[in-house]
Image (cartoon, rainbow, N blue to C red):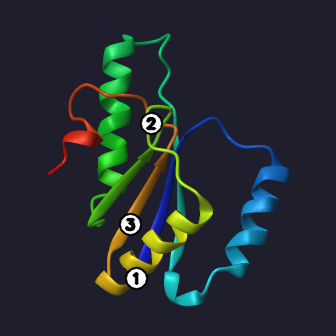
Amino acid sequence: MRINLITIGKKMPSWINLGIEHYQKQLPSYYNFTITSLESQNRKSSSSENSKNLEAKLLLEAASDSTLLIAFDELGKQQTSKQISKSIESWQLKGESVALMIGCLLYTSPSPRDRG
């Protein structure tokens, strides 16, 4: 199973990176966990719509090898740790390649939500 955490936005403070590294070491090696960090697009130099579309394209490109896309956003469904654990177990049994996307907006086109 492969899990790719894809983030888009500003560079995180070093203490966040230390926390990520700490918990990443606790994951089983067969999870093949990677982090892909994408830079958010400058919305001042181009239209907001163009920036969103470019970010959506970059997210989808970064997740192109994934069989399952999960976008974390404020409109999503809240899950407990036990529910997430069961999901991960299911992904592992199915041999999924999972892309977890953080920092993506509700994009117009192409939308990560419309990928099918």
Q: Which residue is mark 1?
A: 92
Q: Which mark is residue 104?
A: 2
Question: What x and y, as percent, mark residue 16?
Answer: 78, 51
Does label 2 or label 1 sit earlier along the sequence? 1
Rounded to the nearest angstrom, the CA distance separating label 3 from label 2 is 16 Å
Rounded to the nearest angstrom, the CA distance separating label 3 from label 1 is 10 Å
Does label 3 or label 1 sit earlier along the sequence? 1
Q: Residue shown at 30%/48% (left/top)? A: 60
In-image side of 110 versus 100 (left or right) = left
Question: How busy is the neighbourhood of tag 1: few (under 14 within 10 Å), some, or many (20 plus)?
Answer: some
Q: As rendered, which of 101 and 79 lies closer to the eye? A: 79
Residue type beneath disc 2? Cys
Q: Quadrant of residue 106?
A: top left
Question: What x and y, as percent, mark residue 56?
Answer: 33, 36
Q: Which residue is mark 3?
A: 98
Q: As rendered, which of 46 and 64 lies closer to the eye? A: 64
Residue type beneath disc 3? Val
Q: Quadrant of residue 12?
A: top right
Residue type beneath disc 1? Gln
Q: Quadrant of residue 28?
A: bottom right
